[in-house]
Amino acid sequence: MADDRFHVYDTTLRDGAQQEGLNLTVADKLAIARYLDRLGVGFIEGGWPGANPKDTEFFRRARTELDLKHAQLAAFGSTRRPGMKAADDPLVAALRESEAPVVTLVAKSHDRHVELALRTTLEENLEMIRDTVSHLRAEGRRVFLDAEHFFDGYRSNPAYALEVIRTAAEAGADVVALCDTNGGMLPDELADVVHEAVTATGARIGIHCHDDSGCAVANTLAAVKAGATHVQGCANGYGERSGNANIFTVVANLQLKRGYDLVPPESLRELTHIAHAISEITNVTPNSHQPYVGVSAFAHKAGLHASAIKVDPMLYQHIDPALVGNDMRMLVSDMAGRASVELKGRALGYELTREQSTALVERVKELEAQGYTFEAADASFELLLRDTVGELRPRYFTVESWRVIVERRPDGEVVSEATVKLNAKGERIIATGEGNGPVNALDKAVRVALERLYPELAAVELIDYKVRILEGSHGTGAVTRVLITSSDTDGEWSTVGVDENIIEASWQALEQAVTYGLLRAGRTAP
Ligand SMILES: [Zn+2]
């Protein structure tokens, strides 16, 4: 169990799930909870049982299907309705029945919200807090209180906002989390209010920030500095509008820069993996620029800096990326000279000779002049490097020919059919695939052809496809550049193809994607 002196409280499954386009099944929620527990957060807010049938189901299944090592589950719900007893409120009953050891109650702390949204008196709102907190405490639950719209409420009526904190704490709430529900606060003012709340009430204070001003993480850190000992946030910063405070960034900052001991260091080294695994489950494309865990978070466009990075990488990065399971990457571009190519080679595990790196730089420049780019296509670069340094590029298959037919049927449906003829392991294979587009059909045909010989291809998925038309130069026609991103269970890689014909460009990227996938899977050349 995590140390109780400082709480890392995740609300991905409740507040994060409010993100536009994010739709989680109960199985998704259970899977995300396992990853958050593996990271070592103290609390996982599972949802609002009673208000949402899926969340009721989550808590029911969690009892038998989740074996949490670090985290405790928290059920979220509101204080009882005006004019009744907490013990008689069916929504409060659903919180009890969730059997979550922690209940987080949301309560109004802004006087105008009490009057306009809740349509009750300020005194009755305090009574609702008192009654619901003490009822759940008597039922053996640990209770946290989320004070909604706290900062706007404090501006409107500071005495009342503070009274909400005192009432909750006196009734037995362990933490009162101050919520910047509208997300518009800036760190300096927020820190002043948190400081006032801590000193004026003596209650244990938590913080819950939204990112509408782009300051959710900064606000969370400022609140901690001002005395908050409980931080709330969401995986990858998920949440409605601009999102919630990114719990991964908050944890990494507090642990690596402020000396807090929040999660086991070996779990922090899994942060990048966990962040990406969760984005697989949510089906939200990972933000490549996300601090600490993004694929670009430690990517350097070498050029001028390359020789210095070679001597001491820490001159150019804020932390050692290995601490969060990320990697320094060197971007290969026509700006880059031999030093960065050597460095990139070394990062991939090759010591290049002077002749080899010169040859590779020449080759990169030549291809870039034709429209290729290796900055975003690491896998293509590695295959090129292997080609340049000798017989290190495995040929798992060779292509005899391919063909794609696109048909618009009488009912208006457009379908594509691809046929590939390949040679692999001494066999000549002819396979067809159908798809909604020509690349999809080619991808399917290649799999049909090769999966019997290379079953590991089943784990390889084509996850992104980008096309760019490049203006021709020096009297040549326009060419098409295709970038394909693929993934397996351990990560992602990108490949590039260029041709005047978009399908040929796609084929090049696809062929490399499959080759690299097999290389990653540890296949040696036949
Ligand atoms: Zn919120």
Image (spheres, helix red, strand yellow):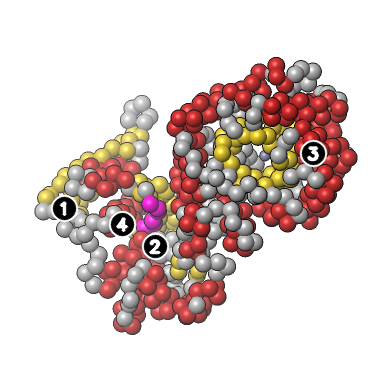
Q: In the structure shown, which secondary structural element does the residue marked by tag 3 occupy?
A: helix
Which of marks 1 and 3 precedes in the sequence?
3
Is ligand 1 within 8 Å of the beta carbon of the residue shown at mark 4?
no
Q: Which residue: 69% across, 30% down?
A: 137
Separation of residues labelled 3 and 1 (CA atoms): 70 Å
Q: In the structure shown, which secondary structural element does the residue marked by tag 1 occupy?
A: strand
Separation of residues labelled 4 and 3 (CA atoms): 54 Å
Span colored in magenta: 490-495
Q: Which residue: 18% across, 47% down?
A: 453
Dominant secondary-structure state across the stretch colored magenta: strand
Q: Is residue 83 left or right of residue 18?
A: right
Numbered circle sitting on residue 520? 4
Which sits in the foreground, 384 or 492? 492
Separation of residues labelled 3 and 2 (CA atoms): 53 Å
Identity of the amino acid at label 4? Arg
Near mark 2 (Cα within 10 A), the count class, few <14, some 14-19 or many ≥20, is many
Which of marks 1 and 4 precedes in the sequence?
1
Q: Are marks 3 and 1 in contact (CB under 8 Å)?
A: no
Near mark 4 (Cα within 10 A), the count class, few <14, some 14-19 or many ≥20, is some
Q: Are marks 3 and 2 in contact (CB under 8 Å)?
A: no
- Residue 491 belongs to magenta span: yes
